[in-house]
Image (tube, grey):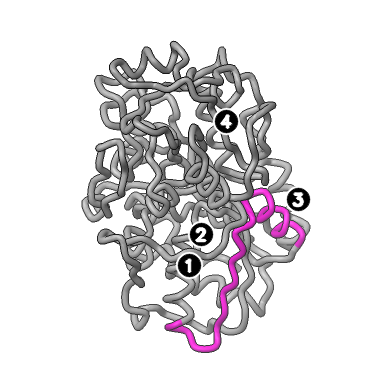
Amino acid sequence: MKLSRKNGLRASAIGALVVSGALVLSACGSDNNTENPTKDGGTKSSAAASNIACDGAKGQLLAAGSSAQKNAMDLWVKNFQAACSGVEVNYQAIGSGGGITKFNQGQVTFAGSDSALKDEEVAESQKICKGGKGVNLPMVGGPIAIGYKLEGVDNLVLDAPTLAKIFDTKITKWNDPAIAKLNPGAKLPDTTIQAFHRSDESGTTQNLGKYLSATAKADWKYDPKTKSWPAPGGQAANGSSGVATAVKDAEGSIGYFELSYAAANKISTVSINTGAAAPVAASTENASKAIAAAKVKGTGSDLALSLDYTTKAEGAYPLTLVTYEIACDKGNKAETLPTLKAFLTYTASEEGQKVLSDAGYAPLPAEIAAKVRAIVPTLS
């Protein structure tokens, strides 16, 4: 999929990513349903539903959480319901924090989160997962794009310290010397920066915080574990779609959201100066180079990943996230277990992963995908 971007740096075709592996994804929040952009700017359904094994799936499956994966989830749900007559999968994109809360309250069968469960959240899940606990199953990943709207500026480069100061309202004008130094020759206006952040609890916010904490320690002093926006100032919007819409509509704006929202709204995105030979654009291919090096830090059935936000590898886009489906390893409700396993079997399958390219995501790395596929049938 080629993304429409004003900065002239084109995202490479996602089809090339079906190699060693790439996780690439999105941001969490409450979003309205939107169709999924394709390479030609239209919309496209995914692969043939006839290949999906329903395996006893029936009734309604409730889920909630990350809006980063919403466009992928829309495709998966459409295909799964087409294949499995009478099954309804209801996914609410209310943000990672909201999804985990609903999961630990027993209101949904699984949750989507752009951050792995914290220790205290795992402990809380044991009340719902009788004899078991909530586990993190990576399903999709991608770059967190920094989108902006600035008349006359088609190519914008920023680094982590400058981003930290912008989102912490320490830099308030677009012609600030720090921005000008990174963009020699650019005609930066004396325009006030309108920085937008998420109003809901978001794994995207948390991943941005982790990135800034790791790469701009002197300029970002906030807790990297929080899913709530920690800095003063700025303007808030609900969900990835809310932030993207706000940036699209406001001159001088900047915000963060999953890459497909930038593509769908034709929003220019920042290239990041990581210390590599050249600034790195936000693209699925570049994020893949960073995420392919992710290591599994979870144990047993838990596949939580550790990402390297400080990478300086050539062409590696460091501001990335992975979205997990969170489910009970044991203690699932008997009436929803067959549908849960059938649905997650499909999303983790080769077919389910392949359709992600139509929504601006990339497939799981082969090694991690194999582990997910091995664990899903063991859920009980």
| Residue density around tag 4, few if under 14, some if 14–19, many if 20 or more, within 10 Å | many
Q: Which mark is residue 74?
A: 1
Q: Name the N-terminal-most of marks 2 and 4.
A: 2
Pointer 2 residue: 70
For the N terminus, the image quarter is bottom left
Pointer 4 residue: 209
Which label lies toward us, 3 or 1? Answer: 1
Residue type at mark 3 is Glu
| Residue density around tag 1, few if under 14, some if 14–19, many if 20 or more, within 10 Å | some
Residue 281 seen by the camera: yes
Residue at 57% in and 56% down: 112
Q: Tell me if 219 is positioned left or right of 122 in this view.
A: left
The answer to whether 50 is drawn above or below residue 138 in the figure is below
Pointer 3 residue: 124
Q: Name the N-terminal-most of marks 3 and 1.
A: 1
Q: Residue furthest bottom?
A: 85
CA distance for labels 3 and 2 = 25 Å
Q: Secondary structure at mark 1?
A: helix
Q: Name the N-terminal-most of marks 3 and 2.
A: 2
Q: Tell me if 254 is positioned left or right of 108 in this view.
A: left
The answer to whether 48 is drawn above or below residue 314 in the figure is below
Q: Name the N-terminal-most of marks 4 and 3.
A: 3
Residues at discs 2 and 1 in contact (Cβ within 8 Å): yes
Magenta residues span 82-105
For the C terminus, the image quarter is bottom right
Residue type at mark 4 is Gly
| Residue density around tag 2, few if under 14, some if 14–19, many if 20 or more, within 10 Å | many
